[in-house]
Amino acid sequence: MANATWNIDTTHSGIHFSVRHMVISKVRGSFRKFSGSVSLDEQDPTASSVSVRIDMASIDTGVQQRDDHLRSPDFFDVEKFPVISFESTKVEKSSDSGLRVTGKLTIRDITREVVLEAEQLGVGKDPWGNIKAAFEAKTSIDRGDFGLKWNQALETGGVLVGEKIEIALEIQAVKAQNAEKAA
């Protein structure tokens, strides 16, 4: 079977992250605007590919002052670098439903290879006849590898913002030929 294009249904998907704050807790957030597609070969998932673009201005941690700081040159500098992108370079099976998706992640014009541990959750038809597929994926990155170096030392030891960022994606995609009917 040939690859079919599936467009990410952003109303039923999410891109989330968490990072340590003050060593003792985590701050969680998400991106509200993103787009992408999956070229999926259902018979041979290793022949598949993924492409995602995230609008950095859409970062949302639930605190406006923190979000504004994250958009500033101290972190993402969204005026200069408005988009994060991911382009897969290889897809491997890791279990019956598990996939290891290797690709190039670009943040602030710095590109690094990352590996997403992914799972295809299933394929089904919605009440309007659209064919949808669902996926989950996780990875972690060192923010310093992407030029996100701002920090502040704490009086009690450690730093304000952790280096490791945990990323989780919950993706629902609609088969392209049915995309115009998506609800």
Image (cartoon, rainbow, N blue to C red):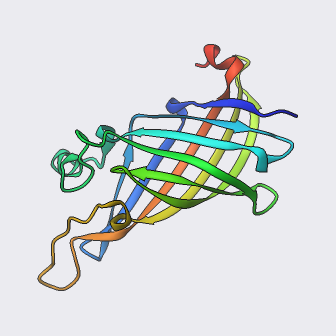
As rendered, which of 60 and 79 lies closer to the eye?
A: 79
Q: Dividing the picture into quarters, in which one does residue 161 lie?
A: bottom left
* Residue 132 locus on image (x, y percent): 70, 31
Quarter of the rendering occupied by the C terminus: top right
* Residue 125 locus on image (x, y percent): 75, 27
Residue farthest bottom in this picture = 157
Q: Residue at x 29, y 49 (%)?
A: 61
In this figure, what is the number of numbered marks?
Answer: 0
Measured along the vertical axis of the image, is residue 159 above or below residue 47?
A: below
Q: Residue at x 63, y 33 (%)?
A: 173
* Residue 29 locus on image (x, y percent): 35, 51
As rendered, which of 134 and 152 lies closer to the eye?
A: 152
Q: Residue at x 19, y 44 (%)?
A: 64
Measured along the vertical axis of the image, is residue 98 above or below residue 60?
A: below
174 lies left or right of 9: right
As rendered, which of 11 and 40 lies closer to the eye?
A: 40
Q: Residue at x 62, y 42 (%)?
A: 50
Regarding residue 171, the answer to whether it shows in the image is yes
Regarding residue 127, the answer to whether it shows in the image is no
Q: Dividing the picture into quarters, in which one does residue 81 lie?
A: top left
Measured along the vertical axis of the image, is residue 156 above or below residue 89?
A: below
* Residue 119 locus on image (x, y percent): 69, 53
Quarter of the rendering occupied by the N terminus: top right
Measured along the vertical axis of the image, is residue 130 above or below residue 145?
A: above
52 lies left or right of 164: right
Q: Dividing the picture into quarters, in which one does residue 163 lie?
A: bottom left
